[in-house]
Image (cartoon, rainbow, N blue to C red):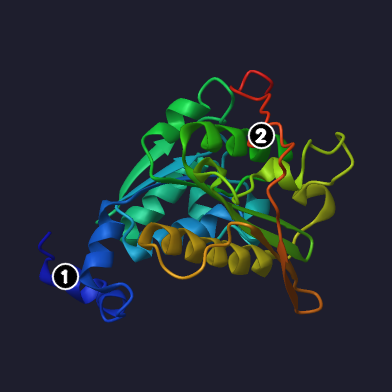
Amino acid sequence: MDFTDTQLHRYSRHIVLPEVGGIGQEKLLRSKVLVVGAGGLGAPLLLYLAAAGVGTIGIVDDDTVDLSNLQRQVIHDESTLGLAKVESAAARIHALNPDVRVEAHRTRINRDNAMDLIAGYDLVADGSDNFATRFLLNDACFLAGKTLVSAAILRFDGQLTTFKAHLGAPHPCYRCLFPEPPPRGTVPSCSEGGVLGALAGSVGSLQATEVLKELLGLGESLSGSLLMMDTLYASYQRIAIKRDPDCALCGDHRTIHDLSAH
């Protein structure tokens, strides 16, 4: 594609990187990413993907902007209180980068719509805040052959990894790490346990970095590793995740073949 003068100026700091260049920037402009959740993680994730020039960004969220969100969900502001988060986020993205096409899906992802929602995208980024959605996205992305970049935050802690078990061994899936969701009520939500606002920004930005790396085919993927962050003590650990041959989804004798269990 031929870049306009405005695009050459806008993306100049990418284009000057030998690992990205014009070819890489063109790849980003042609890429399609689905972001599930326009909240704490989704806010910085969406802003940095849009700023980078990811050409099509889908947003899935059924919530509206509340004043309590603004402590960490920096894509929204007081002028958008009460609006659907997908509409608020779309407006902010359009203001930031008109090159980006936003597809707003004001809905909650579930077993009935998950496969259709992710079908048109190259990659899925999970910024959700509950285990049910994380397991659903893991299963749906595996079945659809999509790479999933997943992050989670609570209190002062964050986690980040990439799943592409559809490529086969040695890549694990989320169920290799957590075979089953925890019992209801055993893990607090952010509204119950709290979350440091800036943590959402740091983890969401790292998540955007991993998405861009996957789209561009750069560096070392986090597939097979879990990055764990304890920001209260400035502690960062990268631990190995091994594929579980007995995994119900991606193991040698699979028992999950659709989303009917969700």
**Residue at 25% in and 74% down:** 21
What residue is shown with label 1? 6
Q: Nearer the viewer, residue 50 or 234?
A: 234
Let me know if residue 202 appears in the view: yes
Location of residue 241 in the rendering, given as x and y in whole percent from the top left corner:
70, 56
Q: Local crowd at mark 2 within 10 Å, few (<14), some, or many (≥20)?
A: few
Location of residue 175 in the rendering, given as x and y in whole percent from the top left corner:
71, 40
In the rendered image, the vertical position of residue 251 relative to residue 92, given as above or below: above
Find numbered disc 1 in the image and state the secondary structure of the residue it sits on.
helix
Which quadrant is home to the N terminus?
A: bottom left
What residue is shown with label 2? 252
Which quadrant is home to the C terminus?
A: top right
In the rendered image, the vertical position of residue 95 relative to residue 37, given as above or below: below
Inspect the image, locate mark 2, and give the three-letter code of the amino acid beneath it: Asp
Distance of mark 2 from mark 1, alpha carbons?
51 Å
Q: Nearer the viewer, residue 214 or 189?
A: 214
